[in-house]
Image (spheres, rainbow, N blue to C red):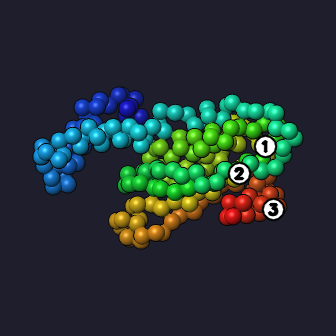
Amino acid sequence: MTDKASDTPVSQAEAEAAVRTLIKWAGDDPTREGLLDTPKRVAKSYRELFQGYDVDPREYLERTFEEVGGYDELVVLKDIRFVSHCEHHMLPVTGVAHVAYLPTDRVVGISKLARVVQGFARRLQIQEKMTSEIAHAIMDVLKPHGVGVVIEAEHSCMTMRGVNLPHSSLTTSCLLGTVREDSRTREEFLRLVRS
């Protein structure tokens, strides 16, 4: 991985050394049998958990289909499960995203919408920013009449530490274009998300 602040690659050995330091700081012995391979495992899992830094989620939206048979209603993909990490505590944020757009003359494969969500989720994030990033990426690339994104997520930084509120969740939304401006379209989107 690369240290984005300086664009200097961080080596596997450096990442593993950092994990060993955290194990020591937590009060355990990184040389004991059960922890010997932990630094390697953690570095490998971080590479996967933060793979969003290695992609531009907007690129997933570039291949579209114009043969839509005159379809001009909302396209809604619900319950896109994701795992992100809070940029303040580096603890998991787990939830679902609901994504919709009102196409003009082309549509995108539905798996691409899920990939956009995953691309932004697999970074250190705050939910509000992630919601906006997903919506604006779809609006900028597909140029639909409108976009709606609703994210519901549980933040481990609240549920397992700090205020310790298990099962609390945060809901954020970003509505653009017709989905925001036209009350009937907005209500239809919200009804479809809730159903």
Q: Amino acid at mark 2?
A: Val
Give the mark nearer the N terminus: 1 vs 3: 1
Image coordinates for residue 169, horizontal then vertical, percent: 51, 66
Element under label 1? loop
Element under label 2? strand
Image coordinates for residue 71, horizontal then vertical, percent: 84, 44
Q: Amino acid at mark 1?
A: Pro
Give the mark nearer the N terminus: 2 vs 1: 2
Kindly identify which residue carries mark 3.
Answer: 183
Q: Amino acid at mark 3?
A: Ser
At 63% from the left and 39% from the top, the residue drawn is 112
> Mark 3, mark 2: which one is toward the viewer?
2
Kindly identify which residue carries mark 2.
Answer: 76
Cα separation, mark 3 vs mark 2, equals 17 Å
For residue 128, side relative to residue 11 (left or right): right
Kindly identify which residue carries mark 1.
Answer: 103
Image coordinates for residue 176, horizontal then vertical, percent: 72, 51
Relative to the observer, which residue lies in front, 29 or 133? Answer: 29
